[in-house]
Amino acid sequence: MQIALLILGWCVYFLLHSLLAADRTKGFSKKLLGKYFKFYRLGYVLFSLTGLLLLLFWNSNIYADSLFNREGVVRYLSLMCAAFGVIIIKVSFRAYSFSEFMGLSENGESFTTEGILKSIRHPVYSGTILIVIGYWLFNPNMPTLVSVICILVYLPLGIYLEERKLIKQFGERYIQYKRDVPALIPKLF
């Protein structure tokens, strides 16, 4: 029963995450909030972060036996995956404007292909994949596996929705960027 509720929690979270990011929702919110719409993005980021942390906290409090031995090499591999994921996300935020990301800037979103974005279109998602795989290796039980699967199933949909908005916003520039740069795994050669 707890696993079913966890799956439902992830589904509701991803649905709200996508709905709140949609242009229609933003347009409606802009009319509704008026001059306070400038805080919409900040509220969205805080909702996303809080929801994610609550779901992971809930996941970690569902008791379940380990599916395999997590000691030795597995433990080091889990920490390496998570560490590389965090590093990729940290490096990716060098290419973004923090104030734009948090909704604190009046400039709106800009389009950049600098830094890590020259090699990969969605480094935050790539880092997230490594972190959740590391999390599962660190805590290899059924609730964690379910959470990882939910996240990995949603990411392609999240990428699709995000890129649809980016194409609408930046047009041919983004389409060409999409052709030239891989989504999640950089080209080695």
Image: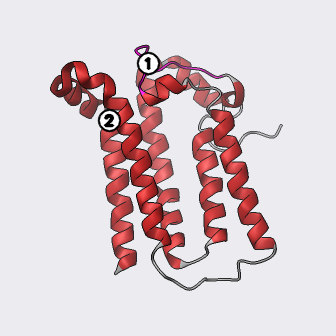
Rendered location of residue 31, percent (x, y): 17, 23
Quick check: marks 2 and 1 in contact, CB under 8 Å? no
Of residue 146 and residue 163, the one placed in the foreground of this image is 146
Three-letter code, disc 1: Ser
Marks 2 and 1 sit apart, C-alpha to C-alpha, by 19 Å
* Residue pointed to by mark 1: 105
Rendered location of residue 97, percent (x, y): 55, 23
Extent of the magenta region: 103-113
For the rendered model, the colour scheme is secondary structure
* Residue pointed to by mark 2: 22
The residue positioned farthest toward the right in the image shown: 189
Of residue 94 and residue 189, the one placed in the foreground of this image is 94
Quarter of the view holding residue 116:
top right
Quick one: label 2 or label 1, which is nearer the N terminus? 2
Three-letter code, disc 2: Ala
What residue is shown at x 42% (from left), y 68% (from top)? Answer: 58
Number of numbered callouts drawn: 2
